[in-house]
Amino acid sequence: MEIPHIVTPRKDTGLFNAKIAIWLFLASEVMLFGGFFSAYVFLRIGADYPWPERTLPVLPGLINTFILIASSVTVVFAWASLKMREWRRFQIFMGTTVACAVIFMCFKGLEYSVKFHHQAARLIDYSVVEGHLGYETKGGHGEGHEGEPDYVKDADGNKIEDNHYKIAASLLTFDVLRAYKPWLENMVEDAGRAGSAITLSEDIDFNKEGDEPDESKVFKRGTELSYDLITKIRKAHLANRNQNAAWRTDFLSEAWDQKWAEVKANDGLGEGAFAADYPKGLELGPDERKLAYVRWKAGKRASMATDVDLNKVMLEIGGKKVHYADIALPEQGTAAFTIDKPFTVRFSSYDVISKFDPNATSINLRDGTVVGGTYEDSSIAFHYVDGIDFQHLAMKAEEKGQDPVIAIENSWLIKENPEVAMLWEKHQKVIGQLEEELATHGREPTHKDRYRMGWQEIAYYMQTNLDDVQIVKGKYAAPKVGMTLVEQFKGPDYTTRMADKAKPQFPAIHIPREMVMLDSKFKPKWNTYYAIYFTITGLHGLHVIGGAIVLGYYLFFGRKMYLSNPEWLANRVEVGGLFWHFVDLIWIFAFPIFYLM
Amino acid sequence: MADTPEAIKKSQKLYLMIGLCLFIGTIVTVAVATVPWLDIGKHGFDTADMILGLCIASFKVGLVMYFFMHLNHEKAWVYGVFVLSLVMAFFLAFLVFFAKGDPIHYDNFNTGGVIVPGCLKLIGL
């Protein structure tokens, strides 16, 4: 049977089938993205921190906007070429469209990559430090700048970033059900390199006392830690736990039956309190009546569960009558290991669930492992600070009715870091000049002008003496160093800017862990701005990929259809093009919202 | 819609002009946000910049939909579908106001707490 209206439009709608479908689909997409943009608005107006305004580099976003607009033009031209039956021209325009999609995604990937490698830390006084971490060296923090440093490496041979919790471990207790294999294996390798032995601290015996001993269920004190050992302990534990669960079910069932018989004998169900309170219970079947009784008891702040005791019940198992306690098998869900010579284990702040306490003697990890030991120096070492932001601190000070400048000058960053204090002094001078200049136009500096120093300002301040610090007339902004084209995409080029050891353009700061409230890369964890930024642009990126695949299919596999029914192919390309235009118009909104507002 | 080869050939100039308008619109959007002497309203980002930026974006979106997506040749019901979806999206967005009905969990996120002052702040009142 031939399907009507795949090429020619219906008279009533004026559209062929696929076009009706794509319009309805795009309407649903409007609601999908509408929901996310609404989420953006609500997150922004409900944010309890200064929303990052104009925080993303504009140039990559601008180029991507141009690319998508250009691709919208070329996809229309590709469709027009098909309508004019010019296959070669169609190929050129459609090829350009797909190439634009690939370039767009490359720029987006570069932008994401920069964010994923950029570190930030919010201190307990709400000041924020941004920058890049170094790698930990065996000589300690900050030793990585000179010569060929000796880096600390993980089990895979990768250098370790200077932002980890470091713990001198002397005891490890694993949750055998949840222990995370890569961490455990890393610890074993680290211990091996440190010349430490991690061994089981006491015997674990899953045999029931008095039963025929099974050697495979015995784990001897002194056995070396391995994931294989943990797996065996887990299996033995689970086997016993499952058997116990089955027995408990049998015993509880028996206990309930006995209790029910007792209830029936004492209460009668037809004359007692239950029946008086709940006469309808008499109309129920036996099972429903039991349930109704339990609910009635619960209403009286009691339950059958509290009335039954499985230990009072005896069942015939293995030819003799026993209590549950007589046959229950030993269970042990944890395994403790001692370390003969403490060694350093490293975990990211995300993986440690205990709040940092320098006096702590045990630290809980996300997989249930408890590390016994003490914290070593776990400072976050920013080797290059490229952003200092006091906006949040100032906001908090204003909420308390305090002078933000005084609050900033009392902050840890200013008091304990002479370089930052020097930067702040220069910035204050600049803000004074900016205030004067803007006042002539009846304007004043923004919060961001006053309380944030970006990487270009920091580099300028680092290179300029206090007396020479001067705003550029007519720029209405703090003075900055210029940036190269590559820096507009990837941020500061540290190799070049730190080459002159006598005049580095970025300070280094070591922040004691107890001063840190939150540390993160510029990922969704950092704040709700990045959460919604990655959500919307990520979803948009998926649409770009999907659209490019469909258009690429027409480009590479459309020739056969073009020869047999060119109008049908033109219709398909028109439908694909409509989706592509939609992808473009979402970006037309996303670009100013995320990059310019 | 231009459907004959001749009509489509004629339309190509229009498509190029629309593309050019979109490029110019983008440059204007960036310029008003980054060039100091084009900064309207208060110094830096403010409500005026937001309204201007969104107006330019809406104009660009209108051009894409009207010409590139050929809405100028579609029947009224297609517009109806889009208007309906926009209205739905708008109302769905404000469903969060119903959170006010639960004073325990969302006490801080209701019309008296954050939303209304936030909206007023956003539009500069």
Image (spheres, rainbow, N blue to C red):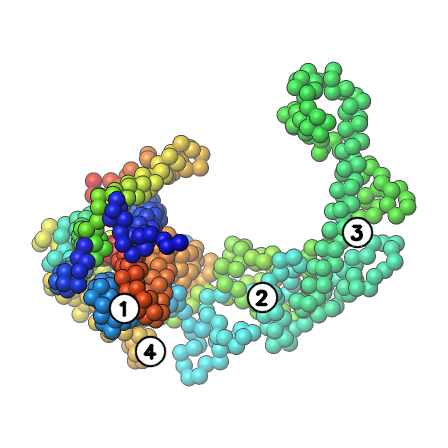
Q: Position of residue A568 (x, y in %)?
A: 30, 61
Name the residue rendered at 59%, 70% in the picture: A186
Looking at the image, residue A51 lies above or below residue A341:
above
Q: Earlier in the sequence, mark 4 or mark 2?
A: 2
Of helix, strand and loop, which one carries label 2? helix
Q: Amino acid at mark 3?
A: Leu
The mark found on residue A329 in the picture is 3
Q: Given this view, does label 1 or label 4 mark the residue nearer the observer? A: 1
Q: Earlier in the sequence, mark 3 or mark 4?
A: 3
Q: Earlier in the sequence, mark 1 or mark 2?
A: 1
The mark found on residue A183 in the picture is 2
- The answer to whether residue A68 shows anywhere in this view is no
Circle 4 is placed at which residue position?
A495
Of helix, strand and loop, which one carries label 1? helix
Assess whether mark 4 and mark 3 are in contact (beta carbons under 8 angstroms): no
Circle 1 is placed at which residue position?
A94
Tell me the CA gap for discs 4 and 2.
33 Å
Assess whether mark 2 and mark 1 are in contact (beta carbons under 8 angstroms): no
| Residue A412 horizontal side relative to residue A329, left or right | left
Tell me the CA gap for discs 1 and 2.
48 Å
- Which image quadrant for residue A168? bottom right
Q: Position of residue A439 (x, y in %)?
A: 12, 53
Q: Given this view, does label 1 or label 3 mark the residue nearer the observer? A: 1
Name the residue rendered at 73%, 51% in the picture: A242
What chain does badge 3 belong to? A
Q: Amino acid at mark 4?
A: Thr
| Residue A197 horizontal side relative to residue A432, left or right | right
